Amino acid sequence: MARYILAIDQGTTGTTVLVLDEALSVLSKVNKEFPQIYPRPGWVEHNPEDIWDTTQATIQGALSKLGIDGQDVAGIGITNQRETTTVWRRRDGKPIHNAIVWQCRRTSDLCAELREQGLEDLFRSRTGLVLDPYFSGTKIKWILDHVDGARDAAAVGDLAFGTIDTFLVWRLSGGATHVTDVSNASRTLLMDLRTLEWDDELLSHLDVPRSVLPQICSSSEVYGHTKGLDVLPDGIPIAGIAGDQQAALFGQVCFGAGEAKCTFGTGAFMLMNTGSEPIASSRGLLTTVAWKVDGRVDYALEGSAFIAGAAVQWLRDGLGIIQSADEIEGLARTVSDSGGVVFVPALTGLGAPHWRAGARGVICGLDRGVTRGHIARATLEGIALQNTDVLRAMEADSGVSLSALKVDGGAAANNLLMQFQADVLGVPIVRPQMLETTALGAGLLAGLATGIWSNKEEARAVWRADRTFEPAMSDAEREGHLSRWADAVGRT
């Protein structure tokens, strides 16, 4: 009998479901978007029912496309937008407020208050995170403080908190299972990185009661089974969970210390596996749990560049240099180099390792000979150069030199960008056949828990590369690019 894995990739703008086989081939894929809600400037919400509706619809669509009804599904893996926070009533599963999305900045003042109380170092040392509205802890407090009756309901045990993985497991299991995995729990500001348990002191500072919290589990185990669904039969194991960036790292089979990936999306998200011990960053990176599998915990360093694909969108929508994002590689290839033009795409400030929120984008080195092609090429180079800053910080923090970088996401299809990334980083860039490695990671985790693969090395054996980009730039040329880049960053 065929054995399939159902991988649910619940993202910020929509939900994607893939059906995978034992060879990690994508047999079926369906995506459905849902509305974004902006109640005030800087506030972002989702209706949890929209998320659940798109999850059911994409499951049904993916199975129908393949012509199966779910009986052959061996397990379900879930990956999710990580810090997005929802709270619901245990008695009927109904959310008490819209989900507060990871992008939402409504708790900025609360984070500032906590910093003024001198708590930044405590949270940083326990959780590996910074006090920022990005993370779930302050979002939970906001909901409990601002929804009528929420704190009273929490006190009597009637409320449940979850990131989106937890919410989906609850719904898939008919309300029987309230869990999260270590990777998502590590993004809440509430879990101790070393004990992998909720931390009472941190809970006290954020006024979050233990009664609302899910059980923290590994990233690959059977958490529960489907029950009472219209789109799936009862009894299918729900067997893998990881936050989206950790799932992409796992989907890239970066199982060893020093292995790293970069996801090229609107921004660029880089994670490096640092092994079995958390490494505190002195260079503005986050320390996070990568996953827990077969009793072993792997940690990671994480850094993000706010703008990657969004810089190409700006050339299209803001400047009109291109009509579609796909045109940029062809335009950039009309010139042999950027002609000395450097573009720092700090269009929303600079993230790790610089952390300058007030920075603004810079294009320098212009003269009368500069063309659209030079601007396009400098844009791609700027994306790669800012990633190099983050990855060099990871190497310095970890003491481990990169041997290669795995890449995924939409912009990883751009051959010119990938070659330049290899050149300025000085290591090979490895692109997989399947660029949707976030869903792949969720599928691998579920397959390990349900016996489709007996260990991680079996999973590694079925992973397939599409192309490797070897560095081809001289040391002198590389140093020239890095020097001009550093000078341009100084001007932001």
Image (cartoon, rainbow, N blue to C red):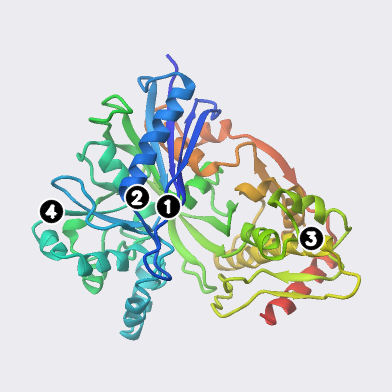
Residue 136 screen position, x and y as percent: 34, 62
Residue placed furthest toward the left: 156
Tag 2's secondary structure? helix
Earlier residue among tags 3 and 2: 2
* Gap in angstroms between the C-alphas marked 3 and 4: 56 Å
Residue 307 screen position, x and y as percent: 60, 64
The residue that mark 2 highlights is 164
Q: Quadrant of residue 122?
A: bottom left
Earlier residue among tags 3 and 1: 1
Residue sitting at 57 percent across and 65 percent down?
A: 306
* Gap in angstroms between the C-alphas marked 3 and 1: 31 Å
* Gap in angstroms between the C-alphas marked 2 and 4: 19 Å
Residue sitting at 58 percent across and 64 percent down?
A: 394
The residue that mark 4 highlights is 158
Instruction: Tell me the quarter of the image containing the C terminus.
Output: bottom right
- Tell me if I can see residue 330 in this picture: yes
- Pointer 4 local density, CA inside 10 Å: few below 14, some 14–19, many at least 20: some
Of residue 271 and residue 380, the one placed in the foreground of this image is 380
Q: Amino acid at mark 4?
A: Asp
Q: Amino acid at mark 1?
A: Gln
Q: Amino acid at mark 2?
A: Ile
Earlier residue among tags 1 and 4: 1
**Can you tell which mark lies on residue 377?**
3
